[in-house]
Amino acid sequence: MPRSAVPRAALVLERVRATPEGFVRSYGDVSPGAPRFAGMVLSELTDESVPWHRIVRADGSLAKGARQRALLEAEGVPFRGERVDMRAARLPD
DNA sequence: ATTCTGACTCCAG
DNA sequence: GCTGGAGCCAGAA
């Protein structure tokens, strides 16, 4: 199946929306082969129904800093300093 | 068509 | 652990 059947932007939104509370996913997970594109899509987002804060970098570091950290901690996401504990919080596929 | 840029990722040192 | 450089997709100049 060619991935072109579904626009990458749609795939990104779908995966982000499917991320349950208390867990996180990396940009690479929501947009395989084009992690930067995922970031671009999220940056344009204004829709509150999309939990953009659950998307973090592959190493657990946050793109949006303290603001994002507060939202994640409020949902029970395990942290290790300034970074998310990916070992426990990363959503298994 | 070429170049730059961006909420990124991977590999080497 | 960290830093730097190259690679990736899409859109704008």
Image: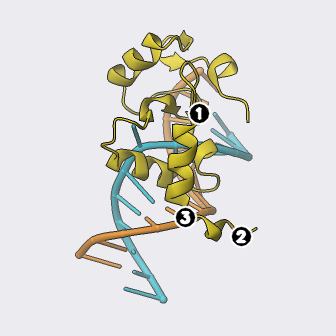
Chain colours: A yellow, B cyan, C orange
* Residue at the spot 50% in from the left edge and 27% down from the top edge: A61
x and y percent of residue B12 in the render?
72, 45
Q: Same chain for marks 3 and 1?
A: yes
Tag 3 near tag 1, CB within 8 Å: no
In the rendered structure, which disc, 3 or 1, sits on the residue that comes first in sequence?
3
Rounded to the nearest angstrom, the CA distance separating label 3 from label 2 is 11 Å
In the rendered structure, which disc, 3 or 2, sits on the residue that comes first in sequence?
2
Chain that bears disc 3: A
* Residue at the spot 43% in from the left edge and 11% down from the top edge: A74
Give the residue type at disc 3.
Pro
Tag 2 near tag 1, CB within 8 Å: no
Rounded to the nearest angstrom, the CA distance separating label 2 from label 1 is 23 Å
Residue A5 found in image quarter: bottom right
Residue A52 found in image quarter: top left
Front residue (pair C1, A1): A1
Residue A2 has which mark? 2
Give the residue type at disc 1.
Arg
Can you identify the residue that label 3 sits on? A7
SS of the residue under disc 2: loop
